[in-house]
């Protein structure tokens, strides 16, 4: 005799991958095919006024389907992974309630982890300590801070790159505030997202082609006014605005300060984005649930495969029998 099973969890699609891999193009194709709405998962796209250096979806692309979590903060407002998780979960719930398909698209691994897996209950931000650590990194070196972290939590030091100063600072801050290594705190229970069946798609285009696209994007950002946009942001928020330390903007700030020529800034920004793409792939490859698509999101075969996977995912699971 068949029994009525509970309403199955709502479907949720994730499109992840390195910078310049075509996540926006694929998310748009899926949203148009399946009546979806897109939730951005990008730690810089959340900021208003930062357009050229973020590769946000264009206004025309945003007009095709609704987008969420773009332009929600001013650059002088910090947006933590916890802030993002809360807002993204609210957006996803609203999309689902409207009978549409939520599609999370972006490459900020920490934000995606916070959204799907939850965060450990970390201490509150301690801005005076952060500023002290930033000053020390500037006066000495990022490697100096990394050595401090290695003394406090050797396991964390092996997992956080020495040049990733914001993460090193946060690890030191949390370790000192909680009086326990951050790696021990990572093992505490998290508030994972529930009520959804998640299909995770990952883009992994050929490395040489990806790097070529990254190089061209870095050149185009500066050619289309990144330094001029950064000038306006500095006039409004000052050189100390934390959002301006992100890739591209940091190099544009160096141009304004006379530390780089534009040609140097393009080269350094391109190298930084290539290194970032490597770190993104390393991060996402740790997730065994990601279904990898070996090309750009704009590739027609990739789109067809993704559409087929999503169509299969949207089919309700078979009813339980007893």
Image (tube, grey):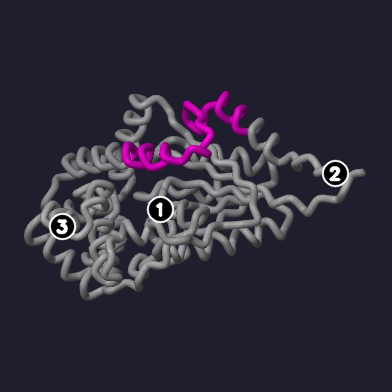
Taking the image as shown, residue 105 lies to the left or right of residue 321, namely left
Magenta run includes residue 304: yes
Element under disc 1:
helix
Q: Magenta region: which residues? A: 277-306
Q: Quadrant of the C terminus?
A: top right
x 14%, y 59%: residue: 148
Number of callouts in the render? 3
Q: Give the crowd class for mark 3: few <14, some 14-19, many >=20 residues within 10 Å.
A: few
Is residue 33 positioned above or below 194 on the image? above
Element under disc 3:
helix
Q: Which residue carries the number 3 mark?
A: 151
x 92%, y 43%: residue: 1
From where the camera sits, is residue 161 visible? yes
Q: Nearer the viewer, mark 3 or mark 1?
A: 3
Q: Earlier in the sequence, mark 2 or mark 3?
A: 3
Marker disc for residue 125: none
Q: Which residue carries the number 1 mark?
A: 110
Magenta run includes residue 148: no
Q: Nearer the viewer, mark 2 or mark 1?
A: 2
Q: Earlier in the sequence, mark 2 or mark 1?
A: 1
Q: Which residue carries the number 2 mark?
A: 322
Kindly give the residue lying farthest to the right in the view shown: 1
Q: Nearer the viewer, mark 2 or mark 3?
A: 2
From where the camera sits, is residue 232 visible? no
Q: Of 225 and 93, which appears nearest the observer?
A: 93
Q: Of 89 and 288, which appears nearest the observer?
A: 288
Taking the image as shown, residue 321 lies to the left or right of residue 293, namely right
Q: Of 161 and 60, which appears nearest the observer?
A: 161
Using the numbered discs, state the Cα–Cα distance from disc 2 to disc 1 in whole angstroms. Answer: 42 Å
Element under disc 2:
loop
CB-based contact (under 8 Å), mark 2 and mark 3: no
């Amino acid at each position: 005799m068949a029994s009525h099973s509970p309403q199955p969890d709502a479907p949720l699609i994730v499109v992840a991958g390195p910078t310049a891999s075509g996540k926006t193009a694929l998310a748009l194709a899926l949203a148009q095919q399946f009546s979806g709405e897109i939730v951005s998962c990008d730690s810089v796209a959340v900021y208003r006024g930062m357009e050229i250096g973020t590769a946000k979806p264009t206004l025309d692309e945003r007009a095709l389907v609704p987008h969420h979590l773009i332009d929600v903060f001013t650059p002088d407002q910090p947006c933590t992974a916890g802030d993002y998780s809360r807002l993204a979960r609210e957006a996803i719930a609203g999309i689902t309630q409207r009978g549409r398909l939520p599609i999370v698209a972006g490459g900020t691994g920490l934000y995606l982890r916070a959204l799907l897996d939850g965060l450990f209950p970390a201490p509150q931000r301690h801005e005076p300590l952060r500023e002290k650590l930033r000053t020390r990194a500037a006066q000495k070196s990022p490697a100096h801070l990394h050595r401090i972290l290695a003394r406090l939590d050797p396991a964390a030091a092996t997992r956080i790159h020495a040049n990733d100063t914001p993460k090193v600072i946060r690890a030191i801050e949390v370790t000192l505030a909680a009086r326990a290594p951050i790696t021990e705190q990572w093992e505490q229970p998290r508030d994972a997202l529930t009520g959804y069946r998640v299909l995770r798609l990952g883009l992994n285009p050929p490395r040489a082609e990806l790097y070529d696209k990254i190089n061209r994007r870095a050149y185009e950002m500066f050619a289309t006014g990144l330094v001029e946009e950064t000038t306006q942001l500095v006039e409004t928020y000052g050189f100390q605005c934390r959002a301006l330390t992100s890739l591209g903007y940091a190099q544009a700030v160096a141009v304004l300060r006379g530390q780089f020529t534009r040609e140097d800034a393009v080269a350094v920004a391109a190298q930084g984005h290539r290194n970032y793409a490597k770190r993104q792939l390393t991060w996402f490859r740790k997730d065994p649930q990601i279904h990898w698509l070996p090309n750009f999101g704009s590739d027609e075969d990739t789109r067809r495969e993704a559409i087929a996977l999503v169509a299969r995912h949207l089919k309700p699971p078979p009813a339980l029998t007893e």
